[in-house]
Amino acid sequence: MTLQEKDSQYLWHPYTQHKTSQTPIAISRGEGALLWDENNKEYIDAIASWWVNPFGHSNKFIADAIYKQLTTLEHVLFGGFTHEPAIKVAEKLMGILPKNQQKIFFSDNGSTAVEVAIKVALQYFYNKGEKRTTIIAFENAFHGDTFAAMAASGISFYTQAFQGMFIDVVRIPVPIKGQEKISFDALKEVIQNHDCAGFIFEPLVQGAAGMVMYEPESLAKLIAICKENKILTIADEVMTGFGKTGKTFAMDYVDEDPDMICLSKALTGGTIPMAITTFTQNVFDAFYDDDINKALFHGHTFTANPTGCAAALASIDLLQTDEIQANIKRINKNHLNFQRKIENHPKVITARTLGVIFAVEIKSDTEESYYGSMRTKLYNFFIDKGVILRPVGNIVYILPPYIMTNEQLQKVYTTIEEAIEMV
Ligand SMILES: *Cc1c(COP(=O)(O)O)cnc(C)c1O
């Protein structure tokens, strides 16, 4: 039996309707921006394997750090114990996060980082004896697939089976260009009419919505409104963190600092699942009490796994090298050139770039759903050409590993141009 045949026998894949989708491709190795399948067909990983892999596959520097940690201390429980790798990650993050972030809490993935942030926002007011139970979120947000994260997410087909079973979330429009005022006014109205505890947002770029972008000044204004009303703000940097937007964090562009930040995905360079939620001292202090009931009773078995911490430390070291910083600028320049080249194409609605993130919206005669027919046609075309891209409806985006070469990038661009002609 081939790997594909065995896969069909045993495995259940994420976001997959197994009856109608094609058999998954079995990947046997990866190096840099490239992957090879079991038949040795080569693919360019143009979306960094769901945005986790900035430094290339099978990165030796991170692998060595992981090996060293595995043979020193692979894991120890974090309840009642601590260890140097966790402390070093905290110290390192304190050096690069917005200055108001003072405490860090470990978990396992983006959804749990968000889950922790939302629970903390709700319990913060519970601990203070204030009734505030509503969370504010953007339309078309994506914050993950656990229950509170799903509640905050606004892309309906991810969550429609569970409507009516969620915590209270009210949604406001994203302040995309020309609609800023609608968004500000909506926020003010929501605050008037609900007991709001927190506002969660993907700063500057909504990834899963199709790389929808908005301006830092608009986000600063929304955060300022929340601050005036003592509503806790949560920046979900799970996608945008660690250089994707051209700065270390998307919040580095924004003049107002959030109360909490969620990190995962590129945190460990795409090696070991790990996540972090960071907090201001003020948030932490609302849980600091003689009363045990005011503690945050949340934890995961693998909290602060030392091996994951070692991977995170190595990743942040790599991110800070001149070489990687130069690569981020180089990719951004290439993207901007490509954007200029195709944005006036008759089949292109709009194209946009921020940091290493590029997206193009393609004209379509029919209303394009997330997993609609154009999406399938595009996806299959890209796979056929050996380029891994996962369009969102009629939106094709690139989020390459920072080490992708100009030649590889060029191939991705050319393939997208061919696809635009084809559909
Ligand atoms: C991917 C993502 C999540 C969820 O992360 P998982 O590790 O898949 O649980 C949350 N928020 C944002 C912005 C994401 O892009």
Image (tube, rainbow, N blue to C red):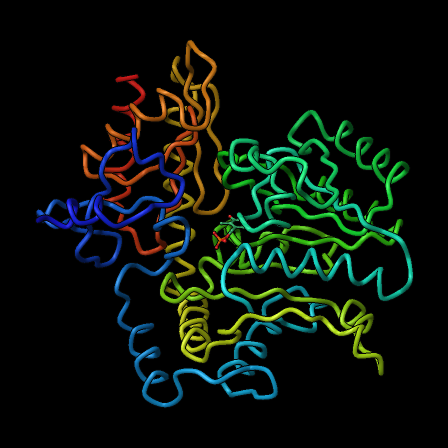
Q: What is the x, y in percent for residue 130?
A: 91, 57
Q: Note whether 129 is above or below 75 in the view shown.
A: above
Q: Residue at x 63, y 72 (%)?
A: 104
Count all numbered tags in the image, as a single digit: 0
Left or right: 169 as drawn, with respect to 249? right
The quarter of the picture where residue 257 lies is: bottom right
Q: Note whether 48 is above or below 98 in the view shown.
A: above
Q: What is the x, y in percent for residue 150?
A: 59, 44
Residue 204 vs residue 323, the one in the foreground: 204
Residue 334 vs residue 159, the one in the foreground: 159
Q: Note whether 75 is above or below 223 in the view shown.
A: below
Q: Note whether 52 is above or below 409 in the view shown.
A: below
Q: What is the x, y in percent for residue 160?
A: 57, 32
Left or right: 3 as drawn, with respect to 166? left
- Which residue extends farthest front? 9
Q: Residue at x 81, y 51 (%)?
A: 197
Q: What is the x, y in percent for residue 211?
A: 50, 37
Left or right: 92 as drawn, with respect to 420? right
Q: Residue at x 55, y 35 (%)?
A: 161
Residue 302 vs residue 70, the one in the foreground: 302
- Where's the C terminus, which quadrant? top left
The quarter of the picture where residue 322 lies is: bottom left
- Which residue extends farthest top? 365
